Image (cartoon, rainbow, N blue to C red):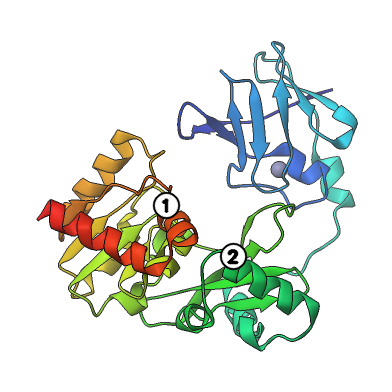
């Protein structure tokens, strides 16, 4: 059988993104948001929703990792189609539609990280401390814990401090995915920790949430490598005048210039180099908080 992949959109670095047909086959709801990333040059694929991954042969056949190496022919390299996926839709259990409001409610239902007793709480705090963080950091960033999922819950809030969605970080290295975004998470349109950083004149901007926790309330995270119009609009509503931008070292020059130019329309921007240890959290883990502060201070002195 040959599965229709449908139309694709361009992803980063030569990838094509398709609405994942495997999501339905493996019991998830139908994917409308192009979660299947296909790299035709490298002949690999991965779905960020149902988690399937594997390699592609020259005929466009997808060989799945796991699932006993099952093979699914696709129309990637031919016009031949077509398998009716609606048979899978019928077998899907009807799921209650959760909306954003319920998620917001849920995040506040999770207990705070240091208030959880029992084994999971202990393991989670051990993980938290292994990242160089303290109890105070957990309170400052309202970090919570889902005992059921064994995940540290990082709430993302809007400009007014109202939770809009949350990120679940696995506390065990073997857990997949490492990061989980709550349903309906609109990460493109928010900047992590902007509700705290908005009162400062000068702030730091990083890619990741944990970089921010490593630095403090005067930092925000893009939660990605791009800056959206929604994010720019939120920045405009603050008194921030200067941003020290530090993206991870794997960021392409083009992406860096794009973010920088967008920011330059509204604030003074300085680009800082990431530390040789990796990102700010790597530096925190290896050298401690004083070195994090010193590194940033030295960087700022160099740029001014
Ligand atoms: Zn999928």
Q: Which residue is mark 1?
A: 279
Please identify the quarter of the rendering in which residue 240 is found.
bottom left
- Up the image or down, 210 lies above or below 18; here it is below
Quick one: 241 or 218, which is closer to the camera? 218
Quadrant location, ligand no. 1: top right
What residue do we see at 14% from left, 52% from top?
Answer: 302
Please state the total of marks drawn on the protein image.
2
Instruction: Indicate yes or no: mark 1 CB to ligand 1 under 8 Å.
Output: no
* Position in image of residue 121 (x %, y %): 72, 78
**Is 215 left or right of 244, judged from the image as shown?**
right
Give the CA separation, mark 2 to mark 1. Answer: 15 Å
Please identify the quarter of the rendering in which residue 287 is found.
bottom left
Secondary structure under the numbered disc 1 in the rendered image: loop
What residue do we see at 84% from left, 22% from top?
Answer: 1
**Is 237 left or right of 64, judged from the image as shown?**
left
Q: Which residue is mark 2?
A: 130
Q: Please report whichever mark, 2 or 1, sits nearer to the chain's N-terminal start.
A: 2
């Amino acid at each position: 059988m040959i599965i229709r992949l449908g139309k694709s959109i361009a992803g980063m670095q030569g990838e094509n993104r398709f609405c994942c047909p495997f999501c339905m086959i493996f019991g998830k709801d139908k994917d409308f948001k192009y979660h299947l990333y296909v790299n035709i040059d490298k002949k690999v694929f991965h779905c960020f929703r149902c988690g399937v991954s594997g390699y592609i042969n020259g005929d466009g056949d997808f060989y799945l990792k796991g699932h006993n190496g099952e093979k699914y022919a696709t129309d990637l390299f031919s016009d031949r189609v077509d398998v009716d996926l609606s048979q899978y839709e019928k077998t899907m259990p009807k799921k209650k539609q959760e909306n954003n409001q319920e998620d917001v409610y849920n995040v506040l239902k999770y207990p705070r990280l240091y208030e959880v007793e029992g084994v999971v709480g202990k393991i989670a705090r051990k993980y938290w401390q292994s990242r160089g963080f303290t109890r105070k950091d957990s309170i400052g960033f309202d970090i919570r814990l889902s005992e059921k999922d064994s995940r540290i819950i990082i709430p993302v809030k809007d400009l007014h401090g109202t939770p809009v969605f949350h990120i679940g970080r696995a506390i065990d290295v073997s857990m997949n995915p490492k990061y989980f975004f709550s349903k309906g998470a609109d990460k493109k349109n928010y900047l992590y920790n902007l509700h705290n950083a908005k009162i400062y004149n000068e702030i730091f901007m990083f890619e990741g949430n944990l970089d921010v926790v490593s630095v403090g309330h005067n930092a925000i995270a893009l939660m990605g490598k791009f800056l959206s119009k929604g994010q720019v609009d939120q920045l405009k509503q603050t008194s921030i005048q200067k941003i020290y931008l530090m993206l991870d070292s794997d960021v392409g020059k083009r992406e860096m210039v794009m973010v920088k130019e967008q920011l330059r329309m509204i604030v003074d921007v300085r680009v800082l180099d990431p530390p040789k240890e990796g990102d700010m959290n790597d530096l925190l883990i290896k050298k401690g908080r004083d070195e994090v502060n010193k590194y940033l201070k030295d960087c700022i002195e160099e740029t001014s």
